[in-house]
Image (cartoon, coloured by chain):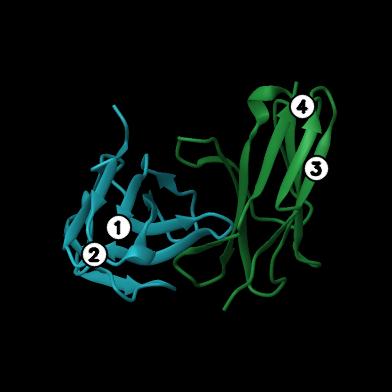
Chain colours: A cyan, B green
Amino acid sequence: DADVTQTPRNRITKTGKRIMLECSQTKGHDRMYWYRQDPGLGLRLIYYSFDVKDINKGEISDGYSVSRQAQAKFSLSLESAIPNQTALYFCATSRQGVDTQYFGPGTRLTVL
Amino acid sequence: ILNVEQSPQSLHVQEGDSTNFTCSFPSSNFYALHWYRWETAKSPEALFVMTLNGDEKKKGRISATLNTKEGYSYLYIKGSQPEDSATYLCAFGIQGAQKLVFGQGTRLTINP
């Protein structure tokens, strides 16, 4: 079984809709991250969390919110989706902040 | 804002040839440099993490070197094979920070 899972794997939604992407991990890591990937731009950090009580904004947090429901679960929400949020979204975990990160399979989100 | 640059952005190599590409990062407050391999339709997977100036790591035909004083790392692939086709990401960890900064990646295509 995968250590880091994401649901859904693919999602098509309409402008203005609220959508939640979920991430679960069985690695027992405290650190969890949400990234988006756009062609030619690499991975950009949206939010990261050190534990359930510690949430931090990344470089592109506008238009997104997160919830750390438990050590193993970290959800990303788009309150009102817009077309330029169409991207591939990755969740990742690590033991410490600069340690190796372990990535989920990604969620491909399309906002029409 | 930390800048991690990878070059070239894309590379086409003939099967059997050797190749290398570069990751440039700030030389101050260095903590770690990571390389990830990211195949199409999969999630990034860790290749190497290096922490000391002069570090060299090797995994099969792939190796990496690190120069923290001048702020660069090279990734080498010897005798390229079609299965080496992927995007190679580097990520820089700064001392005291709790996250990695990713480069935009080098997309490698091996032509049979």
Question: Is label 3 on the same chain as label 4?
Answer: yes
* Badge 1 density bin: few <14, some 14–19, many ≥20, Cα 10 Å: some
Instruction: Report which residue position mark 2 lands on.
Output: A15
CA separation in Å, label 3 and label 4 = 10 Å
In contact (CB < 8 Å): disc 2 and disc 4: no
User: On what subunit does the disc labeled 4 rest?
Assistant: B
The three-letter code of the residue at mark 1 reads Val
**Residue shown at the point (32%, 73%) measured from the top left:** A56
**Residue shown at the point (25%, 70%) measured from the top left:** A54
Instruction: Report which residue position mark 1 lands on.
Output: A111
Q: Secondary structure at mark 2?
A: loop
In contact (CB < 8 Å): disc 1 and disc 2: yes
In contact (CB < 8 Å): disc 2 and disc 3: no
Earlier along the polypeptide chain: callout 1 or callout 2? 2
Q: Is residue B77 visible?
A: no
* Badge 4 density bin: few <14, some 14–19, many ≥20, Cα 10 Å: many
Instruction: Report which residue position mark 3 lands on.
Output: B20
Q: x, y (%) of residue B86?
A: 61, 36
The three-letter code of the residue at mark 4 reads Ser
CA separation in Å, label 1 and label 4 = 38 Å
CA separation in Å, label 1 and label 3 = 37 Å
